[in-house]
Amino acid sequence: MRRSTIIGTGFYVPPDVWTNDDMTKLMDTSDEWIQERTGIKQRHIAEDGIGCADLAKFAAEQAIADAGMTNQDIDMIIFATLNPDVFFPGSACILQSKMPFGTIPALDIRQQCTGFIYAVAIADRFIRTGWCDNILVIGAEVHSTGLDFTTRGRDVAVLFGDGAGALVLQANGADGGVLSSFLGADGSGGDLLCIPAGGSREPASHRTVAEGLHYLTMRGREVFRFAVRAMPSATRQVLEQAGLTTADLKLVIPHQANQRIIESSAKALGLPPETVFSNLEWYGNTSAASIPIALCEAVEQGRIQQDDLIVCVGFGAGLTWGATAIRWSVPLPAVMPSRWKKIWQKLRYRYAALRSLVLRFLRWLFALRIKE
Ligand code: UT7
């Protein structure tokens, strides 16, 4: 049976770290409040001018190298983000222009913190149906440019951080890999977590900016109540679909939003705390990037071994939620690229940059001719 297996992982966070004490210099908050209510100690923040595709590029390069591949082996890019580089074109296309992938399809997923789970489910379908052999799946966020770092926005701004995580999923006939996916959505809860203005319904204006309607707003308590129901339920459903139970689980990789949500979900599932991975204290909530970053760190720390059953589970704006059950297999990727393959890869990077420049120049020339 054709299945998809994770054969490469990579993540990247920008070097700048803002601790809770740094946040107190910007707004009326305290390290004690943030740690007690969320478990977060610090977050990474991107420099000015950096978009999520820039962070994604570093994570993608690592994941592709970890898979022992080069960009030419990738058939498709699926990119989950809630704060894309620009309104359009999509960040998957922007990433494609930064790395030499040729003209492979590039798809954006806008399911916010559940985006990565949706992206893996879609990639898995493309692979199972034989449409693609190797898909790069990315979750990346530059949250910091969409947050109100004043006391007005303190209930939201202290929670989030920037970062990117990536996986390479490959078609494989082995028994493991992605066993099942479960996805859910309830649009009636859309107003609990949203950016109210800046879209087609209410475009950006002086008024929307003055009122801060371009910032993320959230009804925290209601989202909390939704999360502690959604994560255990999605975990159970995805396991049931795979004919398994929580007793078979080695590790749960939950969306990293709040330590209290993670602990409460573990309790609801009857799992000991060490079965549920958390790295929230170091990164804050990185939305679509939180699950892939956590997965990469769990692999790095040796918390996942061959044949282990893991569940990645998330929830977020929409409202949306979902889970993926994975039997960890193929721990040894194909041979690392040879020296020649690496040189070839470098040349392709140069060629891609040159090609992009030439195409822009030709478009400019063409536009001149039309004006005449
Ligand atoms: O990716 C998914 C996204 N979101 C989530 O998962 C968030 C889910 N919700 C939560 O994590 C929690 O609801 C929060 C951490 C956001 C808030 O915790 P809470 O225990 O629900 O606090 P609260 O919103 O009920 O606020 C309690 C108090 C309020 O003051 P009063 O009205 O009791 O005087 C807030 O004004 O805490 C105040 N407050 C703060 N104080 C210091 C809110 N934000 C802050 C802050 N620092 N940053």
Image (cartoon, rainbow, N blue to C red):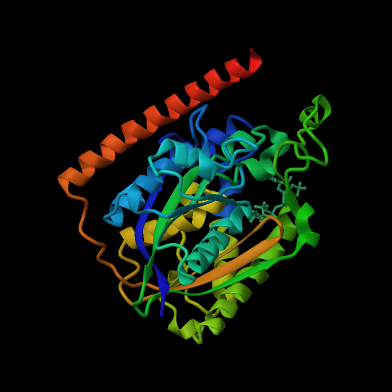
On screen, residue 105 versus residue 298, left or right, reads right
Above or below, 120 against 39 in this view is below
Residue 140 lies, in percent from the top left, at 51, 46
Residue 105 lies, in percent from the top left, at 50, 50
Query: In front: 295, or 129?
Result: 129
Instruction: State the residue lying farthest toward the bottom.
Output: 243
Instruction: State the residue lying farthest toward the left.
Output: 339
Query: In front: 25, or 352?
Result: 352
Query: In front: 60, or 311?
Result: 60
Which residue sits at x=48%, y=44%? Answer: 163
Residue 61 lies, in percent from the top left, at 35, 45
Which residue sits at x=32%, y=31%? Answer: 350
Above or below, 361 against 45 in this view is above
On screen, residue 313 versus residue 209, left or right, reads left
Residue 150 lies, in percent from the top left, at 67, 32
Above or below, 192 against 14 in this view is below
Number of numbered discs present?
0
Quadrant position of the C terminus in the picture = top right
Can residue 282 be spotted in the picture?
Answer: no
Query: In front: 102, or 112?
Result: 102
Can residue 121 be spotted in the picture?
Answer: yes
Which residue sits at x=54%, y=63%? Answer: 122
Quadrant position of the N terminus in the picture = bottom left
